[in-house]
């Protein structure tokens, strides 16, 4: 009997174990699977995702037909994957191959040459993106503002016009990923394998989707709902449903689980004659387990310690927390605590008197006593360096348009209140505490509409750091150039695989990180078993 050890019982680890169990059954290979989890409850990290609702994926991973069917669900009706796809007989090879070819061509993924230029594949980027896919320009600030740190700028107008070589497209799921070229290869390999019936936990007759991970959950019985941002959730609207489905499947497949069990040592030994590797796993309680294959599925706060298990045999990238709130400095921040705005958020970096927009998002901003939070802030935090500035555009429009809008608004208010000042105008647009703080800091009653527009469209908060204890994801891990993206096997080992957060892959909010966890786990679990199938 073969043995597989999965280190980490989170989203990726549970999917890897389940996929391996189904694959072993399909290949008629006796396999015992063990899952080691340091927390008291397997899948506990799933419960915290999506504010307890589990943002399972994003509609950007679906085909246009599936998206159309998804949005056709009226009211609160549940949606199930594959309901809009053509049925195909398992023996109709020509029809299947034609569908597979069409599906591959229709995948909303970029070519390798384009991905190589993407900012998420660069160590340090000086490009920006817009959530609606618009081509924002960036470049050198004009001479008037370049030497005046207090001078306001318009992120879409006050820069020299330098078109982006690679504008962000929110509808392309890969644009949301760090190391997206690697992710592309893995997701497309999983999709092809599922369409060809090579992934046992995704029955071939029903794998007519552009997304194998959602098909997997659909076959477990999960139904979905979608919010107005394209974020997919379980129809129950609670993460407990997803976790319980996975745990029930783990138990049904006879997978052995070890909760509250931290792996302290991982030793590998190779046989020259059989060209195989075996592993000895030692827990913190000094119990030892043998395994023929190991799937690294750790993440979160355990990432640092878990990487140490690999020693110097595998190249790793230092782990840093990302996707979190920003600790900032600004007068009277405590008075802004809990205020929410829908705004444009820009990360601006200044070097050698030249300022550039590094990243941009539009969405909810939540002011806190220490700085700013909210989904838009979380997403841009992935690009922050010490010394950067977060610029908030509370009016969601260029300064020139904001100037005209405010001029008209002041004239309108003065019709009924001839003594109206800027406070009177802004109280009807923003929470009173926000107006009071901004006016005390930036706006006096006798300033021009242009000055008020600059204050509202470029509210600057110098960034001290990312608030590490609130970050959702850990960037870093096993370097992607150490891993075969087609199988997720670590290159210098015949039986060590890495999935989910254990790899140097992360993404923005919206279900992208969980989608990577499900997908990478499913592929690695199947590939671990297929190695023995192919060898026999």
Image (spheres, grey):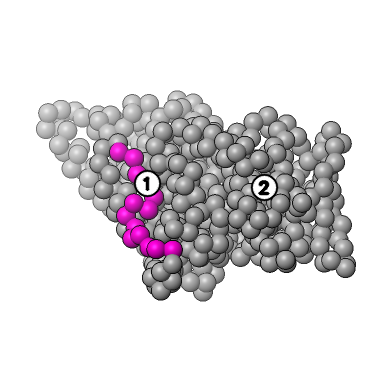
Specify whether 468 is left or right of 292: left
Q: Position of residue 250 (x, y in %)?
A: 61, 40
Q: Name which residue lies at 85% across and 41% down.
A: 288
Q: Position of residue 128 (x, y in %)?
A: 46, 58
Which sits in the foreground, 3 or 396? 3
Q: Name which residue lies at 54% across and 34% down.
A: 244
On residue 80, which mark appears?
1
Tell me which label, 1 or 2, sits earlier in the chain: 1
Task: Determine the image quadrant of residue 186.
Answer: bottom right
What kind of element bears circle 1?
loop
Check if mark 1's residue and mark 2's residue have beta carbons within 8 Å: no
Specify whether 405 is left or right of 443: left
Which sits in the foreground, 508 or 150? 508
Task: Determine the image quadrant of residue 88.
Answer: bottom left
Q: Closer to the camera: disc 1 or disc 2?
A: 1
Task: Determine the image quadrant of residue 263.
Answer: top right
| Residue 180 seen in the current view | no
Q: Position of residue 53 (x, y in %)?
A: 46, 34
Quick check: is 405 in the magenta stretch? no
In the depicted structure, whether residue 82 falls above or below residue 243: below
Specify whether 33 is left or right of 357: right
Quadrant including the C terminus: bottom right
Report which residue position mark 2 lands on.
297
In the depicted structure, whether residue 337 falls above or below residue 60: above
On residue 187, which mark appears?
none
What kind of element bears circle 2?
loop
Q: Which residues are magenta?
A: 77-90
Q: CA distance from mark 1 to mark 2?
A: 28 Å
């Amino acid at each position: 009997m073969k043995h597989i050890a999965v280190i980490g019982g989170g989203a990726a680890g549970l999917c890897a174990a389940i996929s391996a169990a189904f694959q072993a059954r399909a290949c008629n290979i006796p396999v015992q699977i063990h899952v080691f989890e340091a927390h008291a409850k397997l899948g506990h990290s799933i419960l915290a995702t999506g504010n307890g609702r589990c943002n399972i994926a994003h509609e950007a991973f679906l085909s246009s037909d599936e998206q159309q069917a998804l949005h056709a669900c009226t009211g609160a009706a549940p949606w199930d994957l594959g309901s809009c796809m053509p049925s195909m007989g398992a023996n109709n090879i020509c029809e299947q191959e034609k569908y597979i070819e069409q599906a591959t061509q229709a995948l909303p993924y970029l070519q390798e040459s384009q991905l190589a230029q993407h900012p998420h594949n660069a160590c340090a980027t000086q490009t920006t993106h817009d959530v609606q896919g618009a081509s924002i320009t960036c470049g050198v600030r004009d001479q008037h503002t370049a030497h005046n740190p207090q001078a306001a700028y318009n992120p879409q107008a006050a820069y020299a016009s330098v078109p982006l070589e690679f504008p962000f497209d929110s509808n392309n799921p890969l644009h949301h990923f760090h190391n997206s070229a690697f992710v592309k290869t893995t997701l497309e390999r999983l999709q092809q394998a599922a369409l060809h019936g090579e992934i046992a936990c995704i029955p071939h007759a029903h794998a007519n989707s552009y997304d194998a991970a959602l098909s997997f959950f659909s076959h477990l019985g999960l139904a979905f709902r979608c919010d107005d941002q394209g974020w997919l959730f379980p129809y129950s609207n609670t993460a407990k449903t997803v976790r319980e489905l996975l745990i029930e499947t783990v138990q049904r497949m006879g997978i052995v689980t070890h909760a509250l069990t931290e792996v302290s040592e991982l030793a590998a030994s190779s046989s020259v004659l059989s060209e195989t590797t075996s592993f000895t796993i030692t827990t913190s309680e000094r119990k030892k387990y043998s395994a023929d294959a190991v799937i690294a599925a750790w993440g979160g706060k355990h990432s640092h310690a878990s990487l140490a298990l690999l020693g110097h045999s595998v190249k790793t990238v230092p782990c840093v927390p990302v996707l979190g709130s920003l600790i900032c400095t600004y007068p009277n921040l405590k008075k802004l605590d809990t205020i929410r705005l829908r705004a444009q958020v820009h990360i601006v970096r200044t070097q050698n008197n030249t300022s550039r927009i590094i990243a941009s998002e539009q969405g909810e901003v939540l002011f806190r006593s220490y700085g700013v939070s909210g989904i838009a802030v979380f997403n841009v935090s992935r690009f922050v360096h010490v010394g950067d500035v977060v610029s908030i555009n509370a009016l969601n429009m260029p300064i020139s348009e904001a100037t005209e809008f405010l001029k008209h608004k002041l004239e309108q208010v003065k019709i009924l209140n001839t003594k109206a000042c800027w406070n009177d105008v802004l109280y009807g647009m923003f929470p009173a505490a926000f107006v009071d703080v901004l006016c005390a800091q930036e706006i006096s009653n006798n300033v021009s509409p242009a000055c008020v527009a600059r204050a509202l469209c470029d509210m600057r908060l110098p960034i001290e750091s990312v608030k590490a204890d609130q970050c959702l994801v850990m960037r870093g891990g096993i370097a992607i150039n150490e891993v075969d993206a087609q199988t997720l096997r670590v290159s210098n080992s015949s039986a060590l695989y890495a999935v989910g957060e254990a790899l140097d892959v992360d993404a923005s909010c919206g279900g992208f990180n969980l989608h990577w966890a499900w997908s990478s786990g499913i592929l690695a679990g199947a590939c671990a078993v297929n190695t023995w199938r192919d060898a026999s």
